Amino acid sequence: MRMVRNSRLCGKAIIRYLQDKGFPEVALHFVDDLKTRFKLALACGNIEIAMNTAYEMGDDQSWHRLGIEALRQGNHQVVEMAYQRTKNFERLSFLYLLTGNVEKLRKMLKIAEMRQDAMARFHNALFLGDAQHRVRVLEEAGQMSLAYLTSLTHGLAADEERLHTEELSDKLMAYKIDACLLQPPTPIMHADNWPLLSVPKQTLYEKSEVPSHETGEDYCEPAGQGWETGIDLEEALDEHEHQDHDDVIASGWEDELDLGDDLSSAAVGLNGPSTQIKPSGDGHNEAFVVPTSGVFPGQSWCSSSSHAADHVAAGSIGSAMQLLHRQIAAVHFKPMRSRFVLLYLSSLNSLPGLPLANTMHIPLHRATHGADKLPEVALKVPHLILSLKVAYKTFQKGEFSRAQAMFKTIFSSIPLIITETRVASNEVTELLEICREYTTAIRIKNANVASSGQQQLELSAYFTHCNLQPAHLALALNLAMTQSYKGGNFINAAAFARRVLELPSLNHQSDIFSKAQLVLKNSEQKARNAHALNYDERNPFTMDCKRLKPIYRGSPSSSCPYCASTFSLDTKGELCTTCNISLVGVETIGLVSHSNSKR
């Protein structure tokens, strides 16, 4: 380093070496060639030295490169000087527009008039919002139609009367009467050059302050007065020798591992003086420490929760789908697409900022018991209960297609429900069972309408074994009783009539009750079945939700890990026809609705 300071080092090779190693500022101290000095100044971002060198060189190419570097650093004063030296009037006008310097922009308009540059005049008039001058420029350029249309649009009555001719009126198309002036946005704040924060790094300059010793020992910079403790030198030396002796003994526990040069470079990077910025008592060598960037809320949501709804709110749809696949074997996510979009859009508040500024996104957090902050989820259990009540009314009216669509919406929402208590979690499980029973009942009802004869009688009988509300069960029993009586299966009709009469919630004055009494009386007299059905009311069974056939107790079966619908064994690995979300026969942990954060 002493050779560099005394200019005893020369040659292009060492300059290239310093530049490649990231120390172009060191070469500036002994470079005499103007072009090389200018390039090194630009490389290290030293605008002052580059500008002085450009003055000495005096060529436009150097000023152009200086303007580019100054613009990158936000030094618009040097940029203005560079554009003036190179007579780059177009960029100079745009610079004045960005910095809000209207006075100099008007001067550029006068300069354009002196240069007789019609396009430059039009651009500067456009930047200034001077519609009258634009009319004049278009008129002088021979664009009479555009000049007349501009005067009409901006309400320039004097220019309109002067330019008006019958020929122009016939050629012009319709124009907007409520047009507004095209005015560039005015900068909110007029300030000097952009402030630059200098974050010093240890370079060859700092290394040169460390004197070289022939012994080759590491040098430690003396601490300031604020760090002095007044320890006796002899005692410190004794402690140092004792510490070295202990280190030698401790080295017996180390096992040598050859990791190449990476281990050495890592040790130098951790322990060497080049990575430490040592503060002094007067704060001369104190440097600004760049704060570490925070964690985006979405990333912390994903790392703190194992619920798919939190991952969807964070925008991590892929991890949410993986969680649902592991928990309930979900493979068909198209029905849940609208629910995903709802959760993602409702987890953040968007706060518009100033013009030309980015929008601020403020995360919405829900109350949790732990320290982790988790997003607010738009889907709640009360909302699904309200949807269930509407589906009940629709089912009561006989609008089965609409009711089925409502139950499918609830199916697609339940995996994204988060509950805080065990009672709420049980309500979600009960809600899932209700949706399963009603969806199966609607499918049986639709198949019953499309069939006839023996199959129709079987389906009406299966319809009565779905776990429905008492009022809806009465309607199902009435349907099965009527079809069995008309089909000649009087034994089955009598059984359905008895079940109707045993319903505790049925009004004895209702038409269904009176009808059931009459059917029971007539069926007991005839007491025969015209068709042999695959139906035994005394033997408990579950429905095969694919074939709509009974699976009696003791028969092998498989089930859906999400909605618990029952299927035959040959349906294993197929998509569930009830929820239309999960695979049948896959063993999983099941639905996760209770909020449990990762610990």
Image (spheres, helix red, strand yellow):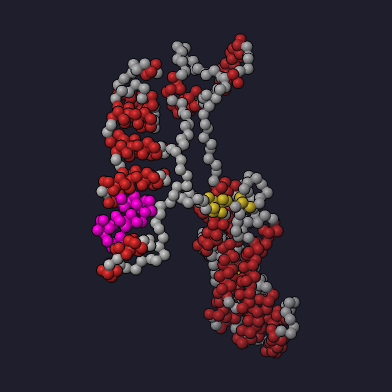
Q: Nearer the viewer, residue 422 or 476?
A: 422
Locate the C terminus and report the quarter of the image it occupies. Answer: top right
Residue at 32% across, 64% down: 161
Q: Which residues are magenta?
A: 121-148
Give the side of residue 449 with respect to residue 433, left or right.
left
Residue at 32% across, 39% down: 84
Can residue 295 be seen here? The reply is yes
Q: Quadrant of residue 11?
A: top left
Q: Nearer the viewer, residue 418 or 466?
A: 418
x, y (%) of residue 431?
A: 64, 65
Residue at 24% across, 58% down: 142
x, y (%) of residue 586?
A: 56, 58
Give the side of residue 390 with respect to residue 23, left or right.
right
Q: Is residue 135 magenta?
A: yes
533 lies above or below 348: below
Q: Quadrant of residue 312?
A: bottom right
x, y (%) of residue 371?
A: 65, 45
Give the side of residue 264 with respect to residue 387, left or right.
left
x, y (%) of residue 504?
A: 75, 77
Count of marks, rendered view: 0
Q: Residue furthest left?
A: 142
Residue at 38% across, 32% down: 47
Q: Main secondary structure of the magenta part?
A: helix
Can residue 584 be seen here? The reply is no
Q: Nearer the viewer, residue 502 or 549?
A: 502
357 lies above or below 506: above
30 lies above or below 369: above
Q: Nearer the viewer, residue 45 or 87?
A: 87
Q: Quadrant of residue 577?
A: bottom right
Q: Is residue 62 magenta?
A: no
